[in-house]
Image: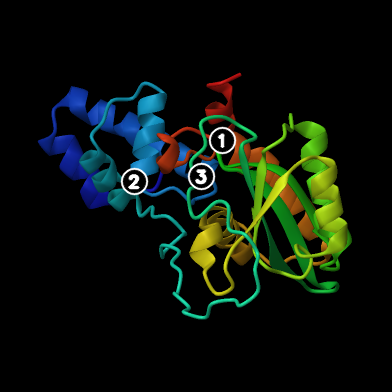
Amino acid sequence: MHLCRSTYYQYQHQTKPEQFKRRQVLYQQIRRIYFDHRRVYGAPKVHEELLREGYHASLKLVQKLMRHLGLRSIVVKKWRYEHNNYIDQMTYPNLLKQDFKAVKPNQKWAADITYIPTKTDGWCYLATIMDLYSRKIIAHKLSRHMTTELVVNVLNQACETRTVKAGLILHTDLGSQYRSTALETALKQHAIRHSYSKRGYPYDNSVVESFHASFKKEEVYQRTYKDYHEANLAQFSYIEGFYNSRRIISADGYLTPDEKEQLVS
């Protein structure tokens, strides 16, 4: 643990021995939580993790101790959209209408594609499907090419691992892969209704796009991938080893996606 000497002596000589010992424990636990969660947590989430583990400390104290340790989230800026007034003239139904709430899993899914650069294989494309109830990524695949086959494969992956009932909504943007005949055919086979964002209205699919923004800031922008295989391992590790199982989400009461799903299991 790296503390400046003045901070150490300040607490040693001005704080009661019991308080000093308690803060040393908090320093250790804060540092552990911060690095265990890929350095992406700021004080609010570190504080929540401490409470979950039985350590009692105020948010203000956690903020203070993190400053002493020189720890801050690597995610510097909040993700924001820029509004675009362009309205698509073609008719694609928006069934979701920015209502991202669901009372149980497998009512509303959202899908999107994002780009990952590699040194030798150029751009790779990560397609994901999120269950909006828990914000869990229920299907994901990285490909060297952005094709219709990619989004169909990810849909099939989701349908194989989830309970699909008639009336389920899949929301996507108006990308050509999501408007393809092959995807529409696959959706009809599973009795899934297709909902589309208006072109130029990213808020219509903001939850899954926000996940991709976090994935890039917390994983992709922190390193350089040699090739497709290295990028594929990284996306799998982030989603399955961190995001779904360990990354708490403030909008869901500081539960992980897996924990949110267990509430109705």
> Which numbered marker is on residue 35?
3
* Relative horizontal placement of residue 22, taking residue 34 as reference (left or right): left
The vertical placement of 99 against 51, above or below, is below
Residue 180 position, x and y percent, is 82, 64
- Location of mark 2 (residue): 43
Instruction: Depth check: give the residue in front, 250 or 55.
Output: 250
Q: Farthest residue in the left direction?
A: 14
Indicate which label's residue lies in the foreground, 2 or 1: 1
Kindly identify the amino acid type of the residue bearing the numbered disc 2.
Answer: Ala
Q: Can residue 139 be seen from the camera position used here?
A: yes
The vertical placement of 211 against 203, above or below, is above
Instruction: Depth check: give the residue in front, 96 or 115.
Output: 96
**Residues packed near mark 2 inside 10 Å, few (<14), some (14 to 19) or many (20 plus):** many
Residue 130 position, x and y percent, is 64, 46
Label 1 or label 3, whichever comes before in sequence order: 3
Spatial CA span between label 2 and label 1? 20 Å
Kindly identify the amino acid type of the residue bearing the numbered disc 1.
Answer: Pro
* Relative horizontal placement of residue 169, taking residue 12 as reference (left or right): right
* Relative horizontal placement of residue 142, taking residue 261 as reference (left or right): right
- Location of mark 1 (residue): 257
The vertical placement of 125 against 55, above or below, is below
Cβ atoms at labels 1 and 3 below 8 Å apart: no
Cβ atoms at labels 2 and 1 below 8 Å apart: no
Kindly identify the amino acid type of the residue bearing the numbered disc 3.
Answer: Phe
Instruction: Depth check: give the residue in front, 201 or 112.
Output: 201
Q: Can residue 4 be seen from the camera position used here?
A: no
Residue at the image point whose x is 41% and y is 24% from the top: 53
